[in-house]
Amino acid sequence: MRKRSVTVGVARWSALHPGRAIIGWLVFVVLCLGGGIAAGMNSASSEDYRVGEAGRAEALATEGGVQMRPTEQVLIRAESGPLDQAAAGAAVKDITARMKSLPEVASVAAPVRSEDGRTLRVQVELNGPEQDGKKNVIPLQAQTEQVKKAHPDLVIEETGAASVSKGVNDQRGEDLAFSETITLPITLITLALVFGSVVMVGVPLLLAITSIMATMGLTMLASHLLPDTGVGMSMILLIGMAVGVDYTLFYLKREREERARAGGRLTSEALVEAAAATAGRAIVVSGLAVIVSTAALYLAGDVIFDSLATGTILVVGVAVISSVTVLPALLVKLGKRAERRALKRQAQGKPVRTYGEKKPGRAWNALLTPARKRPALTLGLSVLVLLGLALPALDMNLKDPARDSFSRDIPAMQGYDRLLDAFPEQRIRHQVVVRAKASQATEVRDALTALDRRAQADPLFSHPSDVPLLRSSEDRRTTTLELNAPHATYSDKAVATLDHLREDHLPATVGKLPGVETAVTGEVPRGTDYVEHQNEKLPLVLGFLLLMTFAMTVFAFRSVVLGLLGIVLNLLSAVSALGLLVLVFQGKWAEELLSFVSLGGISSRVPLFLFVILFGLSMDYQVFVVSRIREAALNGVPTRQAVIEGIGSSAKVVTSAAIVMVTVFASFVMLHILEMKQMGFVLAVAVLLDAFVIRIMILPAALLLLGRATWWPSRAIRRAEQRTAERYGARGVPEAPQATDGRPLSGHWAEPPAARRG
């Protein structure tokens, strides 16, 4: 008899001591959450976001004390008709006095009138770095509201990067709450259809929710090593609910099968231990695959991806721990409760409900028939369909969404639109940063003045004043120049202004000075450099991802063929999902349907995020399905029959898990933030294709065509077939033994429990 695995050992202890296991899990959740709250969240600073030339420019400017600070704009206009100059002047004095009294404010500029004279703009500069703006802006917004009440005849509103950022954070919280109200009912309905029991429905949700709570605390602790960017919590909810329910679903399904197979001859503890030997191992392998795959995000060298990876890894790890520790205890408690009820009903002469191992229904048989009867044709057509869906991805245009893509339901964004209507030059702000010797300060200022004149002659730039916006550090070593342009931040013209500045105007002026260091930053340079940075890192991340996926598959199944097949199938589902993403979001035809404004491209973070998360999550289905096939094959069942039985027995639970996961991801399409919409859409589509096309059409067809070659170079399957042939000779594999009611005990009956654990 083989040595009991750690997974089985832990499950056995939990099953024998259910009370301790449940209390221990609750204590773990409370300690994680309490520790996280006590430690607090360490948010990423401005320095953590710096990438490329824009990041270098920000570092130079910050060192010299001349960095771009967060600025707010207070707009004053009439509800209709011309602006009352006297009333507007009084409002300007009021807002100026109030803002100057705040410690968060560095300076308040003189009012600027729009060209049509209908709007006044008061610029307020905040203290501190830009990342702190969303916290520091709260007192400013309160003062603006007071001025608004004091001058009811005028329309007074505040906008700016800080107030927009705060509005986005508030909206994200509301969106997540809305997402939960959608996903929970659908998850409940799906689980109820799978198990037909209200009690059983509560188990997956209970474990998913407690896993998420524990992970939130752990994330707060982890943020002191890797700063949090605010997106980690969203990912914990997104992935936590999906994998938490999935893992529990797999385990519950196997426990029921073991119960049906035993026919009342085994205790609940023994049944849970038997389930741990199969489903428990699959969950651990699957969780490790997700964790290893997600770790590829750290190679991107980006604080946002670090935050996403940390949240995902922690929530998957906690979900795996809950599935192999407290879940067996809960199942034993529920099993004993069911046994007592069965004895009571039996004593009363009432029929006792049994959970048999149901065969696939007509719908599943219909879906599996093409692969079973015509595997070559099914494989070819399915692959062609997915490749057809992937074609639009060839025209994918990666962009940084920036501020212009945010929802107009945010009041600050409504003010932002009105600001740009009245002052279009405020849309883009480039900052040229020059570091030189103090003795070169005069030459640098002269060169920057010449650069400003060149920009004024360039039709792509704005010309708000005849005086260059120059600033110098106290030591005279760092000098900056600000230039404006009236284009949307994600537009081609916006990128063109940066290209003209970096490639033409800067080399022709400041670039001619000896020993001078130059760089350009601003919202557009940050976005452009970020996309370039992601494109550079994509091959490295994807290469690591493919290697790890291959290695994990070979480790799990001892098969190089399955490792290569897994990579191909994951790439197929990923690129086909990307094709659909481009088709929907890069054009304008779906804008009203899904409530978004097209960027003419895809958020630069989405493809990399898709590959990493999908490769990990698809291992759930790959491990679960192939484990069932391999288990049957190790018991001597011919590979073809094992494939048909394994796919058929796992079809319902895989598709049920996929429905839960798709529901969670699809709910994000209804959110306001465009990047979250795209992430939710592409993951939902990818999981849908993976569950219903890859796992039901392509995988079984490919395995049927490969036959015994599926397991190369492992010889375990061949030895199992030889043992079966020696045992039964020409008679072949006998029919499965029947339970007392005539139902088959199981498709995996040929070996004792110890062999099944192998």
Image (spheres, rainbow, N blue to C red):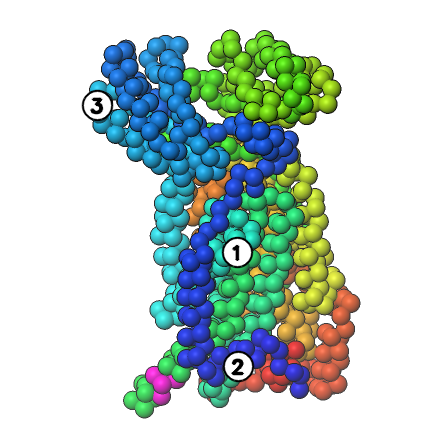
Q: Which residues are magenta?
A: 339-343
Toward the viewer: 239 or 222?
Answer: 222
Q: Which residue is mark 2?
A: 12
The answer to whether residue 576 is visible is: no
Magenta residue check for 341: yes
Q: Return the x and y of residue 570 as percentages of the image width and height.
A: 64, 52
The secondary structure making up most of the magenta span is helix
Q: Quadrant of residue 114?
A: top left
Measured Cα–Cα span from mark 3 to mark 2: 71 Å
User: Label 3 crowding class (10 Å Cα cut-off): few <14, some 14-19, many 20+?
Assistant: few
Amino acid type, callout 1: Ala
Tell me, yes or no, whether the two marked residues, 3 and 2, touch with CB atoms within 8 Å.
Answer: no
Amino acid type, callout 2: Arg
Q: Quadrant of residue 475?
A: top right
Measured Cα–Cα span from mark 3 to mark 1: 48 Å
Please report the residue visible at 51 percent of the width from the left and 48 percent of the height from the top: 228
Helix, strand or loop for disc 1: helix
Q: Identify the residue at the far bottom of this view.
A: 347
Query: Mark 1 or mark 2: which comes first in sequence?
Result: 2
Q: Which residue is mark 3?
A: 152
Quarter of the picture containing the C terminus is bottom right
Would you place residue 325 above or below residue 568 in this image? Answer: below
Q: Which residue is mark 1?
A: 222
Would you place residue 557 above or below residue 747 in this image? Answer: above
Query: Mark 3 or mark 2: which comes first in sequence?
Result: 2
Please report the residue visible at 69 percent of the width from the left and 70 percent of the height from the top: 639
Magenta residue check for 732: no
